[in-house]
Image: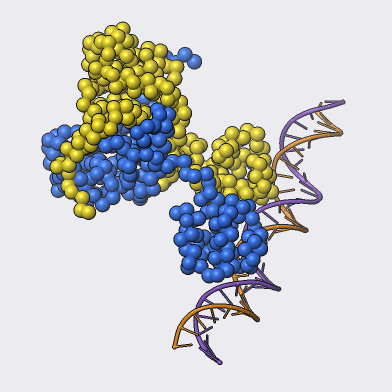
Chain colours: A blue, B yellow, C orange, D purple
Amino acid sequence: MNILEKIANELDTLSKSERKVAEVILSSPSTVIHSSIAALAKQANISEPTVNRFCRRLDTKGYPDFKLHLAQSLANGTPYVNRHVDENDSADEYTAKIFESTMASLELARKSLDPTLINRSVDVLTQANKISFFGLGASAIVAHDAQNKFFRFNVPVVYFDDILMQRMSAINSRQGDVVIVISHTGRTKSLVEVASLAKENDATVIGITTTGTPLAKECSIVLSVDVSEDTDLYMPMSSRIAQLALVDVLATGFTLRRGSKFRDNLKKVKDSLRSSRFDRKE
Amino acid sequence: MNILEKIANELDTLSKSERKVAEVILSSPSTVIHSSIAALAKQANISEPTVNRFCRRLDTKGYPDFKLHLAQSLANGTPYVNRHVDENDSADEYTAKIFESTMASLELARKSLDPTLINRSVDVLTQANKISFFGLGASAIVAHDAQNKFFRFNVPVVYFDDILMQRMSAINSRQGDVVIVISHTGRTKSLVEVASLAKENDATVIGITTTGTPLAKECSIVLSVDVSEDTDLYMPMSSRIAQLALVDVLATGFTLRRGSKFRDNLKKVKDSLRSSRFDRKE
DNA sequence: AAAAATTATGAAATAAAATTTCATTTTTCC
DNA sequence: GGAAAAATGAAATTTTATTTCATAATTTTT
């Protein structure tokens, strides 16, 4: 949370002297980040220890740490804001807005991810007998992309964007299989059922979805990707990009776990495409 | 200017020991803002005065001031430095790196885009009789996603990720049709041919590719998406995400151009999915 | 290739800044 | 009104940063 807001919020829990400090800071925060504790104390007409106590009351380690927080709050207004696209925006404006809110979503998504669970997922994936990716609509694209990536790893991988195929595949799954179910809303009935079916058949079910959704409840491991779809004009935008970034993370984790020899192999896969391309001039 | 970029820029004007400091800082800037000058010196295996001199060389008043700048740069979302995934990275680290470099790529991509051309593309798209999206490999996913989006607009749209289908479709195209060809490298022979075929048959060909590639030369309009794929472990990562963001931009431009009544329609499309979903509790 | 000049570096000393301790003052509550 | 609690600041201490200066490394000149 922005520390300036925090100061404003806690203004009434502060003592009289501490409030003097708060006021000086709020009135010209940018001066304060270049002041020593002595200078600030003098300006607020109180003693240095009071400033120190003030800082700790705001859950910082001390004055220098407080200044760091303050500096961050002042850092020219967060660039990746979720600005809404407006009816009258020019191409320039809506382009900027969409890119910015996409970046903001990625930032949010990263925060919602738990590295421990990513690690666990990578564990499970590296040991899987078979990997299946299921998604519908926009999430089908993510599943498709995941297949494309994991296919290069030379592991048995499939993707389905068809409800019936998903069901059949889920029913045929067994211990050692990993099923990754992708859904932003986590409320698509058929996908939740598929997750449940796969789990009943002893597959490890990894969900890529929003925290606390019905789908999340059915999964062995939930990789939460929480993004707001505010800016979207009735179609999934940020969510699928965050999901794709997560796929990249999983794929990267996979290759790292497999070691350098494995990566040489990946290079070969890539090089195999060369003949299908025009040469670079240089 | 972002101090991290500045450090990266001035890396070669620094002395040997100072460069050690720079490297430690670049590798984990967020640790540094909580370190004392002594701790940082120790980590870089150099002396404290060297750290101090380093700070001054970057036009800061000293170490505490430098930390302030650093804190501000970090607050601004992403360190712009393309940090490479390392063999020994923990899940936490590689997750952060991938998300960060994805965001950096989006930033880059946005800079390489020309709003005038986006506007022109939207023009062409809104007037198209038929829209086709072609891609292969990772770009096929982008084409797939584009179809998914434009399909909602109730316009004739197809996507092919099969070379033969693409060729046939290109040959059958005519004036008023728009063909969007997606390829990061812009060097995939068959795609370049398809673009050329479509153009010969009077379709408007829009290329989503890197500036100056063979594909770019065949297109009526080139939407340049220049990103570096440095961080990638032999598979397309940032490029396709930037392409997807561009698809969002085009789709958004399309809906804006079509006016508010059209957007009501989109809402209906979205609402039509409701019965397939579990209700929200609240 | 040696000598001189320049530049880079760190140990130690110094200075600055922040924090802790503790005695005093103020406020609160009965 | 007075005991208890909380707030406050002076001084001492500790931590941190900076300066000074001697030495080492590098570059330039001869």
Judged from this view, the residue extending furthest toward the top is B200
Residue A152 falls in image quadrant: top left
Residue C22 falls in image quadrant: bottom right
Residue A269 pos. (x, y %): 34, 25
At a point 42% along the width and 25% down the height, the residue shown is B115
Judge whether B223 appears above or below A4 on screen. Answer: above
Q: How many marks?
A: 0
Judge whether A214 appears above or below A9 on screen. Answer: above
Q: Is residue B163 left or right of residue A24?
A: left
Q: Quadrant of the N terminus of chain A?
A: bottom left
Q: Nearer the viewer, residue B208 or B83?
A: B208
Q: Is residue B95 left or right of residue B81?
A: left
Query: Is residue B217 in view from this perspective?
Result: yes
At a point 12% along the width and 35% down the height, the residue shown is A164
Q: Is residue A186 left or right of residue A82?
A: left
Q: Is residue A55 left or right of residue A183?
A: right
Residue B41 pos. (x, y %): 62, 49
At a point 46% along the width and 61% down the height, the residue shown is A9
Q: Nearer the viewer, residue A74 or A20?
A: A20
Query: Is residue B164 in view from this perspective?
Result: no
